[in-house]
Image (spheres, rainbow, N blue to C red):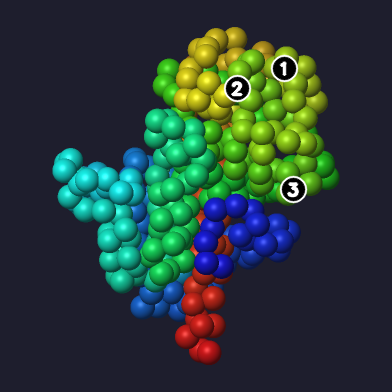
Amino acid sequence: MQRFLTPTDIGELQKALEDAHAVKASPYADQTLGKNKTLLLIFFNASLRTRLSTQRAAMNLGMNVIVLDVNKDSWKLETETGVIMDSDKPEHIKEAVPVMGQYCDIIGVRSFAKFESKEEDYSESIINQFINYSGVPVISLESATRHPLQAFADIITIEENKTTERPKVVLTWAPHPRALPQAVPNSFVEWMKEADVDLTITHPEGYELAPEFMEGVNFEADQNIAFKNADFIYAKNWASYNSYGKILTKDLSWTVTEEKMALTNNAKFMHCLPVRRNMIVSDKVIESENSLVIPQAANRVVSAQVVLQRMLQVIAEEEDF
Ligand code: CP
């Protein structure tokens, strides 16, 4: 595996879930696989879970880890092509990325949507420059349009907690004070389409995801109807795609409350975190016994470890060749 951005990159989902189960049962079984191998984690944006869980996954595999917060620890990087570099950015990403590739065996990159241009964000220009110029395998730690390590952890969590063969999973928009990217809902939908689940999306008017993600997905405009018979409620805020990056409403009637959860089939509550309490979800729901937010975050180590393991196996095969 040379890159990890979409479910296609990990191959057959069932096999990936079996690998996740094996990693969880024996997290230190492959401690020699990462010996003398280095993972470089590059952050253009803040992180708690992604940073710690990916480091932990690498350590479980015996890897060395270097973390670079580009905004604090490095030269500011120019990411536009063809510009006269007379601003406060003294280094171009086209030199910085291949240099980074000299110091490691795998790179993970976090680079959020900037919301300056839909075309720019959806072209995934930052992570694609890492894929094109680093010379090493690249993992998305959340790019402009996708958060695959989160979605893989989400599906592991659903598999572990489902009580029916084909659970009803509802992705609900919920209010937030700031404009957030579509990466988490995009990847969640993309991965759920690969899984054996009955997926419904509910959101206020104007919050449709990009057509390639909405295609083939059941949509219900009424959140209360969507919640009926749900086995999993996955709450998330995202800014508008069509009115790109805009907040169209902060309607608190979309907050996930005990009353809303009572409409479901005793559903489990999920959120990727960090979460704004009493905007996205009430204190009582997130603290209830049906809340999966902590085991969901714990599974971020598992999803990262499966991806790293596969990349290290390819590197080992290439070295043996
Ligand atoms: N869910 C998630 O990616 O969390 P962080 O932003 O803290 O990494």
> In screen coordinates, is 209 left or right of 217?
left
Please report the residue visible at 48 percent of the width from the left and 46 percent of the height from the top: 124
Q: Which is more foreground, mark 1 or mark 2? A: 2
Q: Which is more foreground, mark 3 or mark 2? A: 2
> In screen coordinates, is 7 left or right of 310?
right
- Label 1, residues with CA under 10 Å away: few <14, some 14-19, many ≥20: few
| Callout 2 secondary element | loop
- Label 3, residues with CA under 10 Å away: few <14, some 14-19, many ≥20: some
Q: Quadrant of residue 241?
A: top right
> In screen coordinates, is 9 left or right of 226?
left
Q: Quadrant of residue 291?
A: top right
Nearer to the camera, 76 or 288: 76
- Residue 221 location (% of width, % of height): 72, 17
- Image height of 212 relative to 97, above or below: above
Mark-to-mark CA distance, 3 and 2: 24 Å
Going from the N terminus, do you reach mark 3 or mark 2 first? 3
Residue on which the image places disc 3 = 195
